[in-house]
Amino acid sequence: MLSSKMPGRGLIILIGVPAFWLHLAIGVYLFLSYPTGRVTGRVERVVVVICFLISGTGSVLLLLLVRRLQRRFVLIGAARARCS
């Protein structure tokens, strides 16, 4: 995890999370378009579009929900530590 005192941390996360997800979609595109450099078939195009949509949607959801999930898991972990 990045230090919370690091300057520009928010910008790094804002750029880094979508870039991480986007590289997966680009990898699928490169794999499907390998010898010619073009995605020729309809099924291949649909797969590439779905991968880009999933990567875009996933990164936005991750950016929006990560704080809530972290708080919830920290609270769950704290409650378990108290019980044991």
Image (cartoon, rainbow, N blue to C red):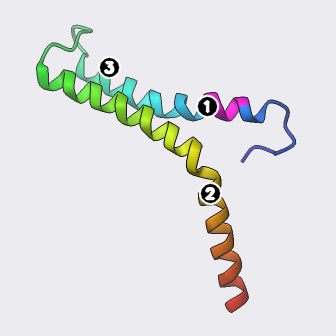
Tag on residue 72?
Answer: none
Task: Tell me which residue sits at (41%, 34%) in the image.
Answer: 55
Region in magenta: 11-15
Residue wearing tag 3: 30
Q: Is residue 65 left or right of residue 30?
A: right
Mark 3 or mark 1: which comes first in sequence?
1
Q: Is residue 55 left or right of residue 32?
A: right
Q: Callout 2: helix, strand or loop?
A: helix
Q: Callout 1: helix, strand or loop?
A: helix
Q: Is residue 84 visible?
A: no
> In x, y percent, where is residue 21?
47, 34
Residue 76 vs 41, above or below: the answer is: below
Q: Amino acid at mark 3?
A: Leu
Q: Amino acid at mark 1?
A: Gly
Structural distance between the alpha carbons of marks 3 and 1: 21 Å
Question: Which quadrant would the C terminus be assigned to in this image?
Answer: bottom right
Q: Residue furthest bottom?
A: 84
> In x, y percent, where is residue 58?
45, 40
Q: Residues within 10 Å of mark 2 (few under 14, many from 20)?
A: few
Mark 1 or mark 2: which comes first in sequence?
1
> In x, y percent, where is residue 16?
61, 31
Determine which quarter of the picture holds residue 5: top right
Residue wearing tag 1: 16
Q: Is residue 51 visible?
A: yes
Closer to the eye: label 3 or 1 = 1
Structural distance between the alpha carbons of marks 1 and 2: 19 Å
Q: Amino acid at mark 2?
A: Arg
